[in-house]
Amino acid sequence: MKQTDRTVQRLMLALISCFQEAAIKEKAAPMSAYMRNQFSFLGLPAPIRKTTQKVFWAKQQLPKGQDLFDFVALLWAQDYRELHYQAMQLLEKPLQKTENAELLPFLLQLLQSNSWWDSCDYIGPKLIGPYLQRFPSLKTEVKNWVQSEDLWLRRTALLFQLRYKDKTDWPLLQEIILELAPETNFFIRKAIGWSLREYSKTNGPAVTTFIHSHEAKLSGLSRREGLKWLKNQQKNG
């Protein structure tokens, strides 16, 4: 084993030990049940986990370069969901600055393993979204995601632009929505509505026109979610 591998391994074990010390064990089972028992939990609610992470990294040096990605991959291979949350958060800032145009396969590997709505809804808008803004030529792959059998990849096609605001590729989003609109899956219908609702904060008339023009194709859930913010604005206005 290389020295860098040993260093990353030791760091992971130190982080797990820190998390275990801070965990509230009786919280673990309810947290797992909330995620339909898809994953094991240590019992670290988000506020405690974030505080624990802050204390840990105040004493430890964060890996850099390839070591960081190796560390993230190591965390992702562990059973506990809190370690997956930490792994995703560690990538957020580096991806906003990276000059490496070959990281998309790594991000998609994360997306398509240990998959559930919580990881999908972080990796899509907060990791893949900013990364594709840095390397827009890679956006051509998104249309292939719509055809994927992987539910979470299809959902990410809808959500990766969630934080783009006026930089949203509106024609692309419309195309993806219409292609996925026939699906009956809750996570897809909800994501259609969510993507429309977020863009309505930037371009309300466009979203209103789109929803009314395609009312027959969109599910009631998608329509309600898509118009929710605009209706609230009208009420409060």
Image (cartoon, grey):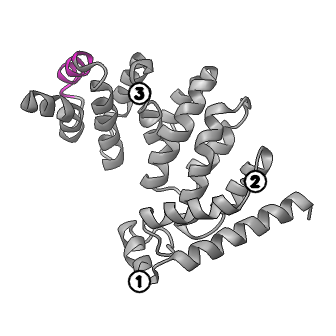
Q: At 57% from the left edge and 62% from the top edge, which residue is drawn?
A: 53
Please state the horizontal and vertical placement of residue 110, each as a whole percent of the image. 61, 50
Image marks 3 and 2: residues in contact by CB distance under 8 Å: no
Q: What residue type is labelled 3?
A: Ile
Please state the horizontal and vertical placement of residue 103, each as a whole percent of the image. 70, 37
| Main secondary structure along the magenta-highlighted residues | helix
In the rendered image, is residue 235 in sight? yes
Q: At 39% from the left edge and 24% from the top edge, which residue is drawn?
A: 165
Q: Distance between the residues labelled 3 and 1?
A: 42 Å
In the rendered image, is residue 112 in sight? no
Q: Is mark 1 on a helix, strand or loop?
A: helix
Q: At 50% from the left edge and 63% from the top edge, which residue is drawn?
A: 51
User: Mark number for residue 26?
Assistant: 1
Q: In which quarter of the image is residue 180?
A: top left
Q: At 58% from the left edge and 55% from the top edge, which residue is drawn?
A: 113
Q: Nearer the viewer, mark 1 or mark 2?
A: 1
Q: Quadrant of residue 183?
A: top left
Q: In this view, does 75 lie to the left or right of 230?
A: right
Position of 190 relative to 33 (above/below): above
Residue 90 magenta-highlighted: no
Q: Earlier in the sequence, mark 1 or mark 2?
A: 1
Q: Name the residue under label 3.
A: 176
Residue 208 magenta-highlighted: yes
Residue extending farthest right: 2
Q: Is residue 208 left or right of residue 80?
A: left
Query: Which residues fall within the magenta stretch?
Result: 205-216
Please state the horizontal and vertical placement of residue 82, each as a whole percent of the image. 53, 65
Please state the horizontal and vertical placement of residue 175, each as a whole percent of the image. 39, 22
Q: Mark 2 points at which residue?
A: 70
